[in-house]
Amino acid sequence: MNTPTATAPTAHPAVVSWVDEIADLTAPDSVVWCDGSADEWDRLTTQLVEKGTFVRLERKPNSFWCASDPEDVARVEDRTFICSQFRADAGPTNNWMDPVDMKTMMTEHYRGAMAGRTMYVIAFCMGPLDAAEPKFGVQITDSEYVAVSMQIMTRSGTAVWDRLTTGTAFVKCLHSVGAPLHEGRTDTPWPCDHTKYISHFPEERTIWSYGSGYGGNALLGKKCYALRIASKMAKDEGWLAEHMLILKLTSPEQKVHYIAAAFPSSCGKTNLAMLDPTLDGWTAETIGDDIAWLRFGEDGRLHAVNPEAGFFGVAPGTGLLTNPHAMDTIERGNSIFTNVALTDDGDIWWEGLTGTPPAHLTDWKRRDWTPTSGEPAAHPNSRYCTPIAQCPTVAPEWDDPAGVPLSAIFFGGRRATTIPLVTESLSWRHGVFLAATLSSETTAAATGKVGVVRRDPMAMLPFLGYHVGDYFQHWLDIGEKTSPELLPKIFYVNWFRRGDDDEFLWPGFGENSRILEWALRRIEGTAEAAATPLGHVPTPGALDLTGLKVDPTTIGAALRVDPTEWVTELRLIDELFATIGGNRLPDVLREELAALRQRLAAA
Ligand code: PEP
Ligand code: NA
Ligand code: MN
């Protein structure tokens, strides 16, 4: 093997010695320091085509179809660990293992794991390179798929190496698919191991991932760094790392508002991030679709930055009617499609892309598929990976190191009952209570059962790097750091409520602009609201429903706070609070729950 240091584009001693150490441990055939260039992209994508991982698409420029191992299709929450020094610091919502035990055990998995493969060293930056304190990472991986995906999803390569000078802090991100190619063993299109560990060492700011090549398990800048590790950094440094989209809205009067919105995975964040408003005169521009870092600006307001450079969006359900801007983005090429179906003429397809499926496809399991096959052609968690910069609605501010000042934060889940279409919180602490008790039906974005209602505080349940009770306290503390009128206003939404006939009560998608408009008008003081035990909802007539065919009783049902439904809901919130435990659950949240209980009893 070549000596890794001989070709290193950096003299950063901690990078060089770590790369040496990992090369010794994992025994790759060679080490490649990634420069993030177009040449590198061409070389690696060509290699991926040659080995059968990628199929080059005829119908989209510089784009590729890819199918994963059928066992490696989503984030593995039961294999994800927060290895804080003390178990109590990981909290009741995370799997925990002692950091020394985890490293001892994983070291044996990594030993020789890259045999017969190339080890890639990727320097990346989460957020704009010109940020006051840019957040760097270095990922070691033995996956070409990961190397090219990281080119899309992060700022990476030479520009980052140049800034990663001696002494600069960076997050060590170690990744192996765990499929060594020992003498005589041939590679598979999607190497991975049955055993998987996605481990985080929050105090050390280190990530060790083993056995999976997919999405959030393997592209370590995303969920592992920008949420789990960054949430801990943010707690220590007085900011917030959140599972939120960022959207710019311009009113017919040309007033600009920026909003952020948190929803669990696969609940429409990307669609809302690329909103096509149905309300006349409104414009929406995209800043981020999945992760927001919120810091106070010198103006005392919370500013949001998207740490990513690409979208890793859920494909099924994305089409010209639901998300035309996502369709335009991928049409421009330079994209990787994983676990969608492949058409006979070299294009991609998934359920919801068009009304009628093609007569013949290659499905995500590489089998012949026809409309009578009886199974979806695309995996429900199949994804498109595409650069944000080529989104037709991208706001120029998406790359602004100062971020954008937030007017409002929305929290939402996927709930068939109980949660109203929109509720305005009564205060920051009441908003934190609503967000803390957020709940949603599980989706295909993570392995496990789909459709089960679970509490998902701030939509961060799978992404928190520390104790959830301390996290709630941190949110409350953030609210004390500036004057109340400078804080974004918190709203609670549910696009997914159903009526007695099981039909959705609200059409969603572009029509959600009507809800956002009401919320912004509330902030400007020009919209009417009525009090409910949960908070303020639009009065009949306060929502602009021009051109929308819904009757007022349906809207009434969508906005209703039903005390009988809330009997069950309060019990589930009690259960959440009980698991958090008395010593870590902020008293403020207990008080907010008691106040809600009283308001419901009086209703
Ligand atoms: C992922 O699964 O890799 C991922 C990006 O997370 P999410 O499910 O939130 O989209
Ligand atoms: Na890049
Ligand atoms: Mn997400």
Image (cartoon, helix red, strand yellow):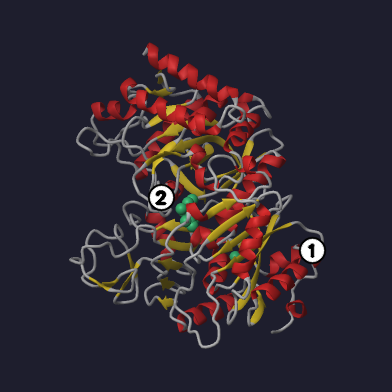
10 Å neighbourhood of mark 1: few (<14), some, or many (≥20)? Answer: some
Quadrant in the picture for the C terminus: top left
Position above or below: 253 against 17: above
Q: Give the residue at x 42% y 77%.
A: 56
Kind of residue indicated by mark 1: Thr
Quadrant in the picture for the N terminus: bottom right
Q: Quadrant of ligand 2?
A: bottom right
Position above or below: 254 against 200: above
Secondary element under disc 1, as helix, strand or loop, is loop
Figure quadrant of residue 296: top right
Contact flag, marks 2 and 1 (Cβ < 8 Å)? no
Q: Position of residue 401 (x, y in %)?
A: 67, 50
User: In the rendered image, which residue does mark 2 sit on?
Assistant: 266
Position above or below: 245 against 570: below
Secondary element under disc 2, as helix, strand or loop, is loop
Q: Position of residue 352 (x, y in %)?
A: 29, 57
10 Å neighbourhood of mark 2: few (<14), some, or many (≥20)? Answer: many
Kind of residue indicated by mark 2: Ser
- What is the spatial separation of the Cα atoms under label 2 and label 1, in whole angstroms? 38 Å
Mark seen at residue 591: none
Mark seen at residue 165: 1
Residue 399 lies left or right of residue 212; in this view the side is right
Confirm or reject: label 2 Cβ below 8 Å from ligand 1.
Answer: yes
Report the front residue among 574 and 566: 574
Report the front residue among 10 and 518: 10
Whichever of callouts 2 and 1 sits on the residue coming sooner in the sequence is 1
Q: Position of residue 387 (x, y in %)?
A: 52, 62
Confirm or reject: label 1 Cβ below 8 Å from ligand 2.
Answer: no
Q: Give the residue at x 54% y 22%.
A: 590
Report the front residue among 207 and 267: 207
Q: Residue furthest top?
A: 602
Q: Residue furthest left?
A: 372
